[in-house]
Image: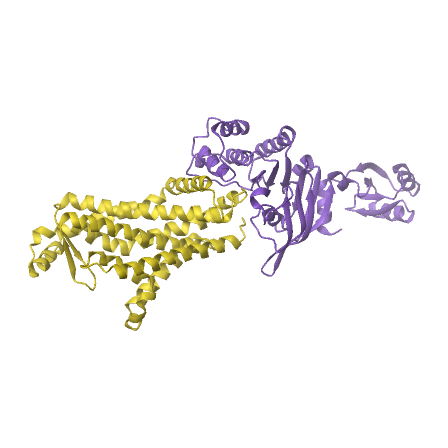
Amino acid sequence: MVINQGMLYQHVRNELWKLFGKKRTYIGFGAFLVAQNLMLLLFRFTRWEHQMETLLAGNGYLAQEYVSALTVALIMLMPQILLLMPLYASLIGGDLMAKEAEDGTLRMILSRPVSRFRLVFAKWITGVIFSICLVIVLGVTAVLFSRMWFPWKSLFAFVPNRVFGLFSAGEGLKLYVFYNLLLTINASVILGLAFMFSCFNMKPAAATILALSVLFVSLVLEGIPFFEHYQQYLLTYHMQTWHYIFAQPIPWGELGQSLCVLLAFCATTFLVGAAAFQTRDIKS
Amino acid sequence: MIELDHITKRFGGRLAVDDLTLQVPEGEIYGLLGHNGAGKSTAIGMMLGQVWPTGGEARICGYDVARHRRRALQKVGAIFESPVFYDFLSGLRNLEILSSYTGPATRARLQEVIAWVGLSGREHSKVRTYSHGMRARLALAQALLPNPELLILDEPSDGLDPEGIHEMRLTILRLHREMRLTILLSSHFLSEVEQLCTRIAVMKQGRLVFEGPLSATKEVESWIRLKVGDFGRAATELRQAGLITRDRDSKYVALNDGTGADQVVRLLVERGISVYEITPAEETLEDFYLRLMNGH
């Protein structure tokens, strides 16, 4: 299929105008900022900070060196990535096509000589751009807000199943940036999943709920002992392997496998969505 | 300009359009009539490649819409009932977005079309601040931007006030006159179709029940309006004398070929029936349409 790049650029620009022209697009960003500051306050003014200092001291480390802006930013980021980010990415993904169909603007667009595949592709690229923006804003604001309360020192990172990792500020920042880049893949996968459902004939809310349901089921199955040997078939398992970026040594093989699985999942959801959109009837 | 060749659409078990064949000739204002659910919007959807036909072929400017969508729709503009836009964006931004799906429009072209539809000065306002009439003009602007040769209007007057309807009617005539556009107009307003269209098609339950020039709808039978002392008796006497073929609504009689109104009056007076009024009754499109729908 031939795609005219100039036209595609224009269509992606259109989609970005539409997406970022809506106030509701920014609600999620606002929710993230509120959640980050709330967690920051909880960390500063409850026993949370003290418990972490005790943990570090118990392992023979100087607590003051590791209770830093980077450490707190990472602590704030993890629950948000697990809870808020899927919710918000699937909300936007579910809206991308289904909201236009619901509002009737899709019918206007499809009275034009534009191919359905190109339209889907432009919307999908917009979704990926949005996912990248979302994670970058999330990562940057987490560091900025925590820097307002905590010093710029070494990074302490808790790694599930691998105890924890300790890094100098420079090395820690590099890993933090890399971790955020990998998280953009998670956001794109979730958004792509909701986008796929959105390409079928359904309401935006239904697309969002279906995408969240898939993630939820995967997460639940991952927690059941019976599925321990089948974890590599579960989406959420691969979405969590990015934590291993803070393990020493970094298990590149495992990370590469997860990267391949998630990219393949992304491509599959896109193709299924495009095929569904190609064959459906658009009516008022 | 538009050719539908034995086109059929089935949604599950429901037949929405049944073996529809029609041609919209270049330069016509063509009316598409039918009740809600008659299949008009589905037929328009198939013309624009939004609905996939179950059978048959829809061609625009000679191109099969399903197979050569881009070429077929290159010179087509469309307006749908209750036009919807991206309310949170300005009118100008909406036009930029929608026109880019055909090909980018220059600033000058955008301003030219905005001026033509009478939206100059308001193009930078958010669409959510527009009245229904302004939205209708914006819809017209987006349809005109790609320099169309064919305009498909699906209930364009829907939701407009009487002044807006009148304005829309004048605009359609202006478009036809000044830009020589071929126009397909689907409308519930029969008077609008009667005033604008040169040719019509009527659909009923997915099937085409009439297709032809508007003038043909008025030539079906020669009716006269009769106001007499006893209409029932008068109709019976006239039928027995072979002067009329039918009567309806206790008011109208259809004259037999070669029968003149003077013969009718003479016979009725001879039979002692008082005649108060006798006038030729030209059938309106509404009469014709209702007759088709009621299966008379």
Per the rendering, the colour in which chain B appears is purple
**Considering depth in this image, is B126 or A54 the residue closer to the camera?**
A54
Task: Indicate the quadrant where residue B154 lies.
Answer: top right
**Considering depth in this image, is A237 or B250 the residue closer to the camera?**
A237
Numbered marks: total: 0
Q: Is residue A41 visible?
A: no
Chain in yellow?
A
- Position of A57 compared to A283: left or right? left
**Considering depth in this image, is B70 or B167 the residue closer to the camera?**
B70
In the picture shown, does residue B47 fall above or below A220? above
Where residue B248 sits: x, y (%)? 79, 47
In the picture shown, does residue A211 fall above or below A142? below
Where residue A133 sits: x, y (%)? 31, 45
Where residue B242 sits: x, y (%)? 91, 47
Look at the image and name its color scheme. Answer: by chain
- Position of A6 compared to A78: left or right? right
Quarter holding the N terminus of chain B is: top right
Q: Is residue B174 visible?
A: yes
Pick out the residue farthest to the right: B270
Pick out the residue farthest to the bottom: A226
Where residue B253 sits: x, y (%)? 82, 44
In the picture shown, does residue B14 fall above or below A40? below
